[in-house]
Amino acid sequence: MAKISVNQLAKYLVASPTQRRSIVVKQIEQKPFIVNYYDQASKAIQKYFLAPSRDEEILVQTVDAIFKMTPKDENEETKFDNNIGAINSFLGCIDEIRIMENSTISEVPNTCPKVTVNGVEISVYPNCVFTGQYNNKNVVGAIKLYFGKNDPLTQNMGGYITALMRRFLEENNNKDGAVNNKMCQVIDVFGHSVFFAPDAYVSRMKDVAIACEEIKFWWDHITQAAQG
């Protein structure tokens, strides 16, 4: 089955025709297991959200711990520096993030379900999901981190990612309450921006459906050609 990450799908939706084919090729060639370059920052931020106190000291302690690490080579030193930069950037946009009072926040397992649209498996994978009260109603939300240091999210890309987060929650977490657009958030860490699910959810998902038809076509065409 054709597969794509939600971040790459967002890029696909705003890309030129030439770029779109290239995105599909890279998804086909992608190795099954890729280490998250920003794993240190991602884990620290996730720990911050999961802690009931949401104490910024959790993030500061991680930065201090990375500073004390001895990199094995120049590449690892650069990685450490970028993870420290990511945490510091995140600290600068905390006030824009919406978290309901007395909400319950949980980690999303690595084996979380994919969203399937027109024969394409989309890996949405929020960093955490939360439930709580909003306007006296039980609602569900989610947070996803985006680490595109040199590739910031546009309003359109953020809209597509959060729309698919809403779809993910509707399919997997709807027993805990209604999915609330204002609580479906993608945080562009280096861009100091927070994007929320758009009100124009139906039209966004129509765009996604058409894009997935194209991706499925290219995926089948390219893999068949490679097989001879």
Image (tube, rainbow, N blue to C red):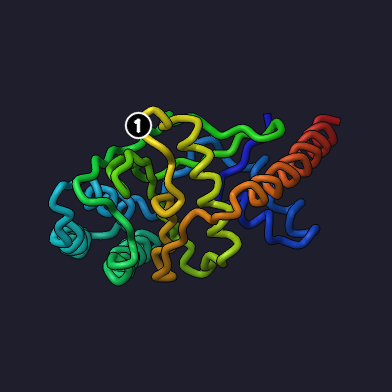
Secondary element at tag 1: helix
Image quadrant where one finds the N terminus: top right
Can residue 84 be seen in the rendering of this structure? no
Can residue 68 be seen in the rendering of this structure? yes
Answer with left or right where residue 26 lies relative to residue 172: right
Q: Residue at x 48, y 43 (%)?
A: 34
In this rendering, the answer to whether 121 lies above or below 68 is above
Residue 149 x, y percent position in the rendering: 46, 67
Answer with left or right where residue 116 lies relative to residue 37: right
In this rendering, the answer to whether 100 lies above or below 82 is above
Q: Residue at x 21, y 63 (%)?
A: 63
Instruction: Compare residues 21 and 139 and report the one nearer the observer.
Output: 139
Q: Which residue is mark 1?
A: 176
Residue 67 x, y percent position in the rendering: 20, 65
Question: What residue type is disc 1 on?
Answer: Asp
Answer with left or right where residue 138 lies relative to residue 65: right
Image quadrant where one finds the C terminus: top right
